[in-house]
Image (cartoon, rainbow, N blue to C red):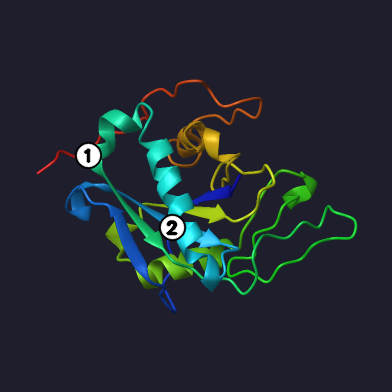
Amino acid sequence: MRGLVLLTGGLPGVWGAPVATVLNNGDPANRVDLAILGDGYTAAEMSRYAAHAQQLVQALFGQEPFLEYQRYFNVHRIDVVSAESGADHPEWNPPALKDTALGATYACASVPQLICVDVSAALTIAAASLAAAQRDLILVLVNDPTYGGSGGPSPSPPPTRRWGSWCCTSWGTAWGSWPTNTAAPPRRCATPPMSPPRPT
């Protein structure tokens, strides 16, 4: 029921947001660190955001290959507060526009279910909130019940029950250079093309 956008890369930061580590498996120097940012969650909805982020983490690490490789990952939740709840829907008549921290909008590139965010703002907040080694991948969780998402360098997810499959597919698209599959996510993802770090 939430949207999700996956980002890679980084920019120098300007201001940080509160951070909670939700999964800690060791030194970020030899782990893959996932940073989750929320968009469209107001200050009053931070507990809801924390619950949604936890559901996403459980869905992702509840399936292979992430279940097997969970000990190679750390996960950090960045509590980004928006002025308004939800996301933009320019495709609606009349359009619905929300004042959110990362500017999440549906109908990106005129595709109704494609969600885009202000990538520069997301990377800037992540860089100001976490050290570089703690943000190998950045996921933006969008607070909107409408089905949607995106893939590639800036992906997002379908309803909660499919977050794990969606993340698996988008992870490969954005980070592992897998081809995009717009028809449907696979029932089971193959192991990503990477050598996991050795646990210490």
Question: Camera-side residue: 167 or 84?
Answer: 84
Write down the residue under mark 1: 71
Task: Give the secondary structure at mark 2.
Answer: helix
Which quarter of the image is occupied by the N terminus?
Answer: top right
Q: Dot 2 surroundings within 10 Å: few (below 14), some, or many (20 or more)?
A: some
Which quarter of the image is occupied by the C terminus?
Answer: top left
Q: Are marks 1 and 2 in contact (CB under 8 Å)?
A: no
Q: Nearer the viewer, mark 1 or mark 2?
A: 2
Describe residue 196's horizontal placement relative to residue 135 as left or right: left
Q: Is residue 85 above or below residue 149?
A: below
Q: Dot 1 surroundings within 10 Å: few (below 14), some, or many (20 or more)?
A: some
Write down the residue under mark 2: 50
The tag earlier along the polypeptide, 1 or 2, is 2
Give the quadrant of residue 82. bottom right
Residue 97 at what x, y percent from top left?
76, 66
Residue 134 at what x, y percent from top left?
30, 58
Q: Is residue 152 above or below residue 52?
A: above
Which residue occupies 39% across, 73% down?
128
Which residue occupies 51% across, 36% down?
173
Residue projecting furthest to the right:
93
Residue projecting furthest to the left:
200
Describe residue 155's horizontal placement relative to residue 46 as left or right: right
Q: Tag 2: residue type?
A: Ala
Residue projecting furthest to the bottom:
14
Describe residue 98's horizontal placement relative to residue 82 as left or right: right
Q: Is residue 56 above or below residue 22?
A: above
Q: Tag 1: residue type?
A: Arg
The reply to whether residue 8 is in sight is: no
Give the quadrant of residue 129. bottom left
Which residue occupies 49% across, 58% down?
49
Question: Camera-side residue: 197 or 76?
Answer: 76
